[in-house]
Amino acid sequence: MAKVLVSELVLRDGHQSLIATRMRTEDMLPICASLDSIGFWSLEAWGGATFDACVRYLKEDPWERLKRLRKALPNSRIQMLLRGQNLLGYRHYSDDVVRAFVQKSADNGVDVFRVFDAMNDVRNLRVSIEAVKKSGKHAEGTISYTTSPVHDIPYFVNLAKELEAMGSDTIAIKDMAGLLTPTATYDLVNAITAAVKLPVHLHSHATSGLSAMSFIKAVEAGAAILDTCISPFGEGASHPSTESIVAALAGTEYDTGLDLGKLQEVAAYFREVRKKYWQYESDFTGVDTRVLVNQVPGGMISNLSNQLKEQGALNRMDEVLSEIPRVREDLGFPPLVTPTSQIVGTQAVLNVLTGARYKSVTNEVKNYLLGHYGKAPGTVNESIRALAVGNGEVITCRPADLLEDEMDKLRTEVESLARSEEDVLTYAMFPELAQTFFQERAAGTLKPEPLLEKEAVSAA
Amino acid sequence: MAKVLVSELVLRDGHQSLIATRMRTEDMLPICASLDSIGFWSLEAWGGATFDACVRYLKEDPWERLKRLRKALPNSRIQMLLRGQNLLGYRHYSDDVVRAFVQKSADNGVDVFRVFDAMNDVRNLRVSIEAVKKSGKHAEGTISYTTSPVHDIPYFVNLAKELEAMGSDTIAIKDMAGLLTPTATYDLVNAITAAVKLPVHLHSHATSGLSAMSFIKAVEAGAAILDTCISPFGEGASHPSTESIVAALAGTEYDTGLDLGKLQEVAAYFREVRKKYWQYESDFTGVDTRVLVNQVPGGMISNLSNQLKEQGALNRMDEVLSEIPRVREDLGFPPLVTPTSQIVGTQAVLNVLTGARYKSVTNEVKNYLLGHYGKAPGTVNESIRALAVGNGEVITCRPADLLEDEMDKLRTEVESLARSEEDVLTYAMFPELAQTFFQERAAGTLKPEPLLEKEAVSAA
Ligand SMILES: [Co+2]
Ligand SMILES: [Co+2]
C-alpha cells in the first residue's frame, strides 16, 4: 500500500506561521464538518503557541477549544504538538505534571501526540511518550531536523531507532527551518524507512520554497504521511498547499485519495477567514532562502533585527549573522528551534555588541552549559564553558530527574481560581497569564483582542 | 553534461503575473549588473504585455527599454516572447511585418525568441522562426501546453518534431495555466527528449502550486533549461522561485552552478521594488487549484467574474464554469491562452445568459470557425459551425496567406508621427496607443501613470 496519507495543519501550524496564531475557535467550527469528511490522516489542532494565544489574546479556554473541536470532528484524529518534558511551556516540568497533562489532553480529545525536544535528547521525550501510550493514544516520536557537522544520516537513523524502541507509533521528521532539500529528504527518509518499521511522517516548512519538492522525493523514498496546509494558509512560512500535494500525487501510485473538489470548498472558506486577520499579516510572506546561505532561519533574523534596532545597532547585523554559527558550534550544534534559537541568538548579539565574546553571558546560556536543557548534540566548547560557568556543577542526568513532583503544589497555588484539573494545568504552563485569565473569567470580563476593520483603518 | 540551466523571468513574466506588468525600466537598470553576472542562460525581458504596458501606462518607448537593457546586460542573452504571426498584437500580420519586427528586435538586442501560437498551428510560427534564423538569433519553438482528449503525448511529440524540422534551436513547453503535474511533466519531457535532439526548456506557472515539483521531475526526465523568477516576484500566478530551484538542485548532478549568495542580493533588491507597486497587487496571490478541477484557469475565472458582475449575473457563475469546457469542445479544444481564452469565455457567458447555446455568437467565434485563427487542434463541431457562420467560406490555408504586404501602408499611415522604423512597428502593434504616445512625445507631455504612496492613501 503506497497510498500517501495527509495531515492537515490549518487549525494549528497554518495560522501560527502566517497570522501569529490568532485564529479563533468560532472560525474553525463552521468548516469542521467538511474537514471531518475529507479523510485526512489527522487534523493538527493544538500546541504550545495556540494554547498560549488562546489564554493571552483570544481569551478562550484552550481546553474548551479542544472539547468543541473533538465534538465537531467525530471521524478525525486530532493531533497536537508537545515539547516533550517542556510540554507547552518554556521550562522542564516534573514527571507528574507531564503525566497529568498528557492524560487530560487525551481525555479531552487528542488522538495523536507529536512529541519533540529541541536538543533531540530522547531522555526529554521518554516520560511523555510513556504517558501517551498509557492513555491508549498514538505517540509520534519526533526528530528535530537541522544541519551541522554532527547531524548526519547515521545520527538521525540512530535517533529514529531510539524513538522506535521507546514505543513510538510513527516517526516525525520536523524541519522547522525549511532546510530539507529534495535530495537530503530522499536520503534521510530512505535511510530511516530502511532502519525502522514505523511509518515516517514529514513536516517541512515552505519558507525556502523547497518543501513541496522535498515531498515528492519523500514519497519516492517511502514516506507514509505528509503535513500540508490548505492553500489560503499554505506556502511561505507555512507548509505546502494541501490541494497542490493532492493534485501532484493524484493518479500515481502515491495517490492520496483525497477529493480535490471538496478541498476547494475548504479553501474558499479559509480564504475569507484569512482576510479577517489582515492585521497579523507580516510584511513579506514569500519565499526566503536566507537560512540556506547563512544557517540562520528567517524568523530568527526578524527577531534579531528588532533586538538590534532597539539598541541602535542595526548596522551590526552582518557581524551577528556571522557570529551565530560560531555560538552554535560552541554550544555543540543544537537545532535552532524554540528555545535554543533564542538562546543562541541573544548570546550572539551580546558577543558582538560587548566587543568581546562571552564577556557577558546570559543565564540561559549558563543553564545550557550546565546541562539543564539536556545533552548537546555535539561537543560543547570546554573553554567557553569554563569561562561562562566556572566551577558550576554540570549535570549529566536527565534534567527532570532533579525535579520533585509538583502537581500538589500547583493545585494549592491556584486553588482559589481553578475550577478543574485542566485549569491547574493551564496555570502550570503559563502561571501569570492563567491567573489573569481566571480572574477575568470570574469577573465575566473576558474579552478577545479586537479584530480591526480594514476599511475603518484606511479611512482613519 | 546534466547541469541544468536557468532563465530568469523577473523582467517580463514575473511582474506581468504579479503586478499587472507595471515595472518601470528605472527599476530594472540598477540591478542589471548583478543579474548580468550570475550566469543565467537567458533573461526574459520583452513581450506583448510589457510592450503594451510601456506604451499605454508607463509612457516609455519599449524599444528604448530594450536598448537600455541590452547595454546594461552585456554578458546575457535577452529573451522575448513572440506570438508567432500575431507578433505582440492581437491580429495576424502580413509576413513583411513579421520579418521587419523580428529583424528590428534582433538589431536592438533580443537574442532568444520564444515563438508560440495559441492554436499550436505551426503554420503560424513558420515565418517568424525563419526570420529569427535569418537574423542569426536563437529560435525557441514553443508548445502551448493544455489537457484535452486530443492533447496526448504523441500529439505534443509530433509538434516538437515539427518545431525541430522548422529550425528551432530549443523547444519550450509553455504551461501558462499551471496544469502540468510532476508525473505528466516527467512523461512529456521524457517523450520529447527521446524524439528530438533539441534541449527542452520548461515554463510552468506556479498558480496551482505544482510547478516546482514538476521541475524536479522535468530535470530527471532530461529538461535542459528551467524558467524561474527571483523570489519577490515568484510563486502564485508567477513561477517557482529562482533561489529555491537553485538550492533544490545544488550538489546534485543537476546543479545549476548559480551562486545562492548573489541571488540573495537580487532578491533583496526586488523585495523593495515590489513594495513600490503595491497598488497593482491582486487581492489573493496564493495557490489556486481551481483549474485542475474545472479546467478553467484562475485568471480566466477572475475575468468572467467581472463580466458577470457587470451584468448582474454573478449567480450564473457555476453554469458558466460548466459551459466553458463544452464551448471549448465545440471549438476543437484550443488551449486556453490569449486570445482563445477570451474567445471561449465570452461565448460561454453568452450561451448561459441568452438562455440558448449559440443563439448569439461573437464575431471572434465566427472568425475562429471560419479558420481565421488557424487550424483547431481537434474536430470542430460542424452543426455549431453551420449555426454560427452559415455558408461563410471556411479557409484551410495559413491565415496570413490571405494578407498582402502592409509595411508600406503602415509607414504612410504614421508618417507624420513616426521617427524611426521601430515607431512604425509600434504603430503596427497598437495603432491607437502608438498615435497617442507619439503625439505626447512630440508635445513633451509623456507622463507615466502615477505610483501611489501607501501612507498617503491610508491617511486619506
Ligand atoms: Co511547524
Ligand atoms: Co508565462
Image (cartoon, coloured by chain):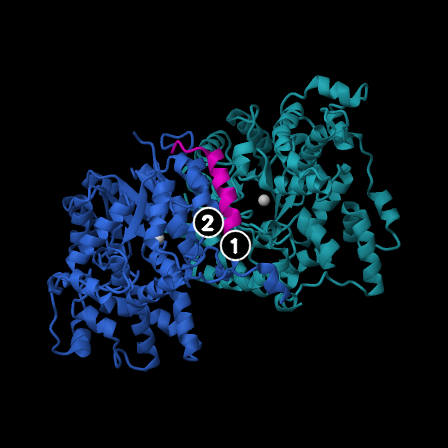
Chain colours: A cyan, B blue
Q: Position of residue B450 (x, y in %)?
A: 49, 62
Q: Secondary structure at mark 1?
A: helix
Q: Position of residue B247 (x, y in %)?
A: 45, 36
**In the rendered image, which residue does mark 2 sit on?**
B27
The mark found on residue B276 in the picture is 1
> Of the residues shown, which amino acid type is indicated by label 1?
Lys
Is residue B170 found inside the magenta-colored segment of the image?
no
B69 in relation to B330, above or below: above
Residue depicted at x 26% and y 81%: B359
Q: Quadrant of residue A297?
A: top right
Is residue B264 found inside the magenta-colored segment of the image?
yes
Q: Quadrant of the N terminus of chain B?
A: top left
Q: Which residues are magenta?
A: B256-274
B262 in relation to B104, above or below: above
Instruction: Give the dominant element type of the magenta stretch: helix, strand or loop.
Output: helix
> Of the residues shown, which amino acid type is indicated by label 2?
Asp
Give the letter of the chain under mark 1. Answer: B
- Return the disc, 1 or 2, that comes first in the chain's sequence: 2
Q: Position of residue B57 (x, y in %)?
A: 41, 62
